[in-house]
Image: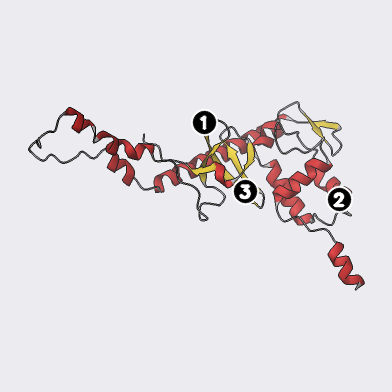
Amino acid sequence: MNNLESLMESPEKFTSSKEVIAFLSETFPKCFSIEGEALPLKIGIFQDLAQRLESEERVSKTLLRSTLRHYTNSWRYLYSIKEGANRVDLDGVEGETIEKEHADHAQKQLEESKAKAAEKRKAKQAQQPQKKEKRQFARPKSSGSTPAGSNKEGQQGTKPKIQRPTKTPPAKLTDADMQQGTNVTVKLGKTPMPAVITEIAKDGIHVQLDSGMVVKVNADALRLARSKRS
């Protein structure tokens, strides 16, 4: 019974990087964050985390390491690696200054990541069917004669049918679309913004905007990105 009770009382382990980042932001708020500007982390901070979280059963070292890699490879974090900025430890104490070599490396990573995201977006758009576009520009067949009682108003009455495909709302995401790398639009305000899905979690979906910011939204706020004509 004692073993059973101990198992029931043991905390549930984290299963995703999103959960770990949220936990780190709450535990070390002067070091980690989930939104806004990120702070450059001290080199070797994994060892500090492993030591401070040694008694924390919910975080495994394997997941902690992959979470740090996910966090430091995000656009938001790479923006923070600038020459002359100070790195911080778990308590927010400033330490070593970022050298030009490290700043240049982060900038290169950021540019490569943006280029890959753009390629994925173009490839996704190229795979989308173009049937709706063709239907939009199809001309109605001429009957060769004008039916009795027809006039300009009658001809204008056919226009909404031709233009209707342009007003078709973007499709909602299916289960097959719920995966990393899918190009979507997310409605954060009045205007939908293009984004790419970076992570699927239990309580929401992480998407990365063109600005580099990562936000969490519900699936209802997402739509498949449209293919734009050149």
Residue that lies at the very extreme toward the front in this rendered image? 149
The picture places residue 157, in percent across and down from the top left corner, at 24, 34
> Identity of the amino acid at label 2?
Leu
Residue that lies at the very extreme toward the bottom in this rendered image? 1
- Graded by Cα atoms within 10 Å as few (under 14), some (14 to 19) or many (20 or more), the crowding at tag 3 reads some
Q: Is residue 116 visible?
A: no
The picture places residue 31, in percent across and down from the top left corner, at 80, 37
Mark 3 or 1: the one toward you: 1
> Identity of the amino acid at label 3?
Glu
**3 or 2: tag closer to the N-terminus:** 2
**Looking at the image, is 16 positioned above or below residue 77?**
below
Reading the image, the residue beneath label 1 is 191
The image quarter containing residue 169 is top left
**3 or 1: tag closer to the N-terminus:** 1
In the rendered structure, are the residues bearing label 2 and label 1 in contact, judged by CB atoms less than 8 Å apart? no
Q: Nearer the viewer, residue 97 or 39?
A: 39
Q: What is the quadrant of the C terminus in the image? A: top left
- Graded by Cα atoms within 10 Å as few (under 14), some (14 to 19) or many (20 or more), the crowding at tag 2 reads some
Residue at the image point whose x is 57% and y is 50% from the top: 180
The picture places residue 29, in percent across and down from the top left corner, at 81, 37
